[in-house]
Amino acid sequence: MKLFSILFLLSLSVHCIKAQTDSLSKEQSESISISSQNDFYQYWLQSDRNFTNGIHITWASHHFNNKVMDKILFGLKQSTQKEFSLTIGQDMHTPENAELSEVDSTDRPYAGLLYATYKKVTSDYWRTLRIETNLYFGIQGPAAFAGQTQNFMHSLFLENKDFNGWDNQIGNGLVLDMDITVHKMLPFVGKLYETNVFGKAHIGTIYNYVLSGLQFKIGKYNDTYYSKYGVRQKRPPVINDSKNRSKARILMNEKRSIGDTFSDMLYSLNQVKQIYFFTEFQVGALFYDGTAQGSLIQFQPSPYVLKVEQIDPLILNWVYGINFNLKRWMFRYYRVVENDNFKNKNLFGWGEVSVFYGL
């Protein structure tokens, strides 16, 4: 309930900000969404360990497009669309044994995060290129109230099974992170499928890592480089025509048999009915994990944290999911399977359920 209250107060304050459009005078795709992450949302690898629970509420709106954040956050100099959003999120990380009330130095520590994320997405529809930048600001530790949230959720769904070790969680510290992701469509496309490659760098007080990956989508969907999530819009943004097109864009539009002007393409960019499957393969290197080692800017000591030699730097992730929409409602489920960077060095996973509404 505290997350909802914070978001409501933020929405009231943001309404006082003068609405702005991007440098090309185009409206962005706008939506509100709520997502829940939990190991419970999967059939295999159900286990309350590592990342076990999260909730995120997002408002994507031109109200967040202001000169200050536009300068701070990286993006394409020339884009067909800019999208800004604000997210309030809370994450919970736990060891495997929930019954222990004392410190288990053989496993990862408890850790909770409460933070806001300011996102800027710049896309070039014609060159099939997108840059996303996220700025995270918040608190780690007891002040994030993660233990209270997790035990409340378990009391609702799991017969009041509490996690008894939250008193041993990592102490309060600063969350101040930024990440940048670059997406590019490859010329391996068809009428109902596409292939994208991406790279990501994350730096800050909590996470420091790099990764790259390959994504494949198949089904009926709004164009990936027209809007970030593809939620159907009541007033879809307008883009200018251009002859500077990537090979992937030329092939994609030929396969879909759509015209060369925005008015010809609009129906395929803002479809009423969508359903598609996607999968990603990611590989990278982890340099620091504050959810196990503590924030790099710590406000109080922690009962214990892991040392560098106790963490595996290899990142291997497999992500897959499905999206479908009804009018301006969009529903998404995806699952993440990761290698365990801590105790067991084997696989663990979690799922996410999200609901979007296009404004």
Image (cartoon, rainbow, N blue to C red):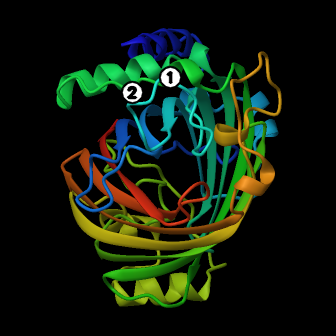
Residue at horizontal 36 percent and vertical 13 percent from the top: 1
- Observer-nearest of 335 and 299: 299
Give neighbour class at mark 1: few <14, some 14-19, many 20+ (Cα, 10 Å). Answer: many
Residue at horizontal 40 percent and vertical 57 percent from the top: 349
Task: Please tell me whether mark 2 sits on a helix, a strand or a loop.
Answer: loop
Residue 179, position as x, y percentages in the image: 71, 49
For residue 75, say whether it is visible: no
Residue 252, position as x, y percentages in the image: 44, 84
Instruction: Answer above or below: position of 29 versus 294.
Output: below
State left or right for residue 303 relative to residue 28. right
Residue at horizontal 48 percent and vertical 53 percent from the top: 238
Quarter residue 161 falls in = top left
Q: CA distance from mark 1 to mark 2?
A: 7 Å
The amino acid sitting under disc 2 is Phe
For residue 127, say whether it is visible: yes
- Observer-nearest of 237 and 157: 157
Q: To which residue does mark 2 refer? A: 163
The amino acid sitting under disc 1 is Trp
Residue 79, position as x, y percentages in the image: 67, 58
Q: Which mark is residue 166?
A: 1
